Image: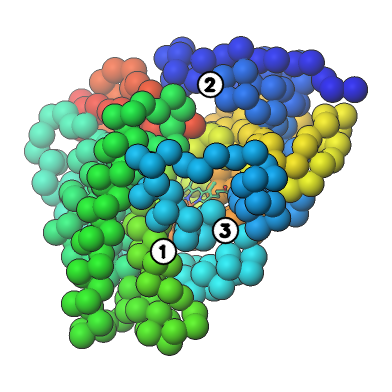
Amino acid sequence: MQPDYLLDLDPRDPAFYNNPYPAYHAIRARSPAFFWKQYGIWCFAAHADVTALFRDKRFGRQILHVATREELGWEESPTHVKPFYDVEAHSLLELEPPDHTRLRTLINRAFVSRQVERLASRIEALAHQLIDGFERAGEIELIEAFATPIPVIVIAELLGVPTGMAPQLLDWSHKMVAMYQFGRSRKVEDQAVEATKAFVAYLKGYIIERRQKPADDLMSHLIAAEADGKKLSEDELITTCILVLNAGHEATVHAIGNGVKAILENCLDPRPLLAEQVKAEPLVEELLRFDAPLHLFTRYVLEDLDWNGITLQKGEQIGLMLGAANRDPKRFPNPDQLDPTRESNPQQSFGGGIHFCVGAPLARLEMRVALKVLFERLPRLRLTGQPAYRDAYHFHGLERLDVRLWP
Ligand code: HEM
């Protein structure tokens, strides 16, 4: 029998996106699965379902490898958004094996922990440099002044794009990822297409330059793979650069922002924890669990099936509620408590299965080092008001984070 839990909840309601956790608890208490009217899909809020669904091969980020558009009754994308989807079609985040495996293998090496650890001193220097710039001020807005520049500069350097491009990269990226938020408008679509075209044009020109001057960075590695002819096409090279640049900072900015907010609101002195790596790492995991920067990811159902009494048909989409899974009391005792000493913390903020975030080691390092420097240098940091989240569900990040630096 099909469970009958129809949820009528507007993702653009400020009361919801500013603090979705009471709603998640109420939903989960009634049923682990619900049909979300506004999205028109079945969604799963329990930790056990979310972890199992991420790993189940009967679900995929893509479905066109097992069915045609005609079979699915899909129309072509409207012409005005086609340039965006043409680029996205080559993204490893939108592919399934074997293409996914081929592309992921090419970038994976750059992001494994031992490679990424080499960036710790660079992240630390960057954090100090930013704080040097605002230490004398009485109050500051931390999202713009601290949380945003670190991830974008680090990912640009890792890929091999000039850091002077950072403001432009941020602008293109924000316009492109706005395509994934709930209730996007025609204006959002047009801006995303313009940003896509400009980003592609820039990278095409830049790649021509870089072919002459290879360096020790990810882009040179990808250019060499493309030149090899078999491993990577030019379209894949461009899309991979765009994906790495966009995914490489969007969520990390908000993981840092949400983390600082959680520490300050919970009156936690993080300095003794951040001073030792063995304690700092669990703190970062707990911050990611407590207030994840991304709350909902979708999957296609690749074959007709039954999931705990819910009939799912090939071609439909389902939603995995990461923020809700992270607060599931069946998996996390006292889920609404920020507890950096949790014994076991299988938080789901980086997803799971074959698309598990390839940048997770980098994001964890950036959070650990940035927070350490921030609280060492500014131990008396205080919030100056109640920070508001952006109206951009399923993203869960702060509009601003206003703080006082000294009492
Ligand atoms: C705290 C920060 C971050 C969070 C919360 C996060 C979260 C995620 C999640 C949930 C996914 C899986 C999406 C799905 O399964 O549908 C993902 C995939 C991905 N992430 Fe991250 N991410 C973060 C930082 C980064 C960074 C720093 C990079 C750097 C390159 C990155 C690159 C990627 C890429 C390339 C994928 C696609 C992987 C694949 O499809 O195999 N992310 N991320």
Amino acid at the residue labelled 1: Thr
Mark 3 and mark 2 in contact (Cβ < 8 Å)?
no
Work out how far the residue at label 3 is from the one at label 1, CA to CA, in angstroms.
12 Å
Going from N to C along the chain, the mark reached first, 3 or 1, is: 3
Amino acid at the residue labelled 3: Leu
Of the 4 image quadrants, the one containing the N terminus is top right
Describe the element under mark 2 as helix, strand or loop: loop
Instruction: Name the disc covering residue 20, or none.
Output: 2
Q: Nearer the viewer, residue 158 or 242?
A: 242
Residue 105 spot, x, y in % from top left: 54, 73
Circle 3 crowding by C-alpha within 10 Å: few under 14, some 14–19, many from 20: many
**Residue at the spot x=53%, y=68% of the render?**
104
Q: Which residue is mark 3?
A: 95
Q: Is residue 381 above or below residue 275?
A: above
Instruction: Name the disc covering residue 290, or none.
Output: none
Amino acid at the residue labelled 2: Pro
Going from N to C along the chain, the mark reached first, 2 or 3, is: 2
Task: Say whether residue 177 is left or right of residue 206.
Answer: right
Work out how far the residue at label 2 is from the one at label 3, CA to CA, in angstroms.
30 Å
Asked if disc 3 is less than 8 Å from ligand 1, the answer is: yes
Task: Say whether residue 268 is left or right of residue 301.
Answer: left
Whether residue 348 is visible to the viewer of this picture, yes or no, is yes
Of the 4 image quadrants, the one containing the C terminus is top left
Q: Nearer the viewer, residue 191 or 273?
A: 191
What colour scheme does the image use? rainbow
**Residue at the spot x=79%, y=46% of the render?**
303
**Residue at the spot x=30%, y=50% of the render?**
196
Circle 2 crowding by C-alpha within 10 Å: few under 14, some 14–19, many from 20: some
Q: Which residue is mark 1?
A: 240
Q: Quadrant of residue 243?
A: bottom left
Describe the element under mark 1 as helix, strand or loop: helix
Residue 331 spot, x, y in % from top left: 73, 36
